[in-house]
Image (cartoon, rainbow, N blue to C red):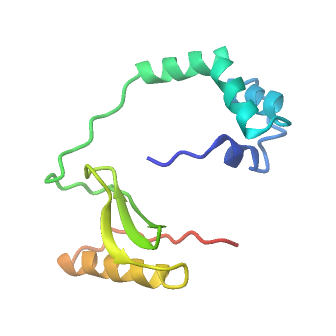
Amino acid sequence: MWMPSPVTLWNEPDARTDKSDSPLKKFLLQSSKLSPDEKAVFLEKDESIRVTHESSAQEGQTEAPSVDEKVDLHFIAFVNVGGHLYELDGRKPFPIVHGKTTEETFLEDATKVCKQFMARDPQELRFTVVALSKA
């Protein structure tokens, strides 16, 4: 599952004015002027982040359903990595390569794969397609 990076969170409009005293906010404030390498060292030594991570990890995670099981709420992502169109699906053990792509043809190439998915069950209308692009 994709999770926003601390930098992404910090760039959100409300993040800097948030009144919470969370470990993440403290880390972002204390490391904001550090280089990436210095931030990595700082993060390695940050006890509050470690404790928060361990606490969250102890909660566990729901086991993913088998690949053969029909799932109504299911998310995948298409990405361009090294000129290849990859499908990222947490229900599969590895990324699926759908061929070559470029920045210019990525949306068109991903649309072709989506149309193949739709053709498998033309009566199924419960799906959404979202495209994220650079503004």
Where is 103 relative to 29, above or below? below
Where is 73 relative to 47, above or below? below
Q: Is residue 122 visible?
A: no
In this view, the residue farthest toward the left is: 68
Residue 101 at x, y percent in the picture: 44, 79
Where is 97 relative to 40, above or below? below
Labels in figure, total: 0
User: Which residue is rendered at x = 44% and y = 85% of the image?
Assistant: 108
Residue 107 at x, y percent in the picture: 48, 80
Residue 46 vs residue 60: left or right? right
User: Which of 12 and 31 lies nearest the eye of the viewer?
Assistant: 31
User: Which of 18 and 101 lies nearest the eye of the viewer?
Assistant: 101
Residue 5 at x, y percent in the picture: 62, 44
Q: Quadrant of the C terminus?
A: bottom right
Q: Is residue 24 visible?
A: yes
Residue 10 at x, y percent in the picture: 75, 44
User: Which residue is rendered at x = 60% and y = 72% of the image?
Assistant: 133
User: Which residue is rendered at x = 44% and y = 23% of the image?
Assistant: 57
Residue 106 vs residue 91: left or right? right
User: Which residue is rendered at x = 54% and y = 23% of the image?
Assistant: 53
Q: Which image quarter: residue 21?
A: top right
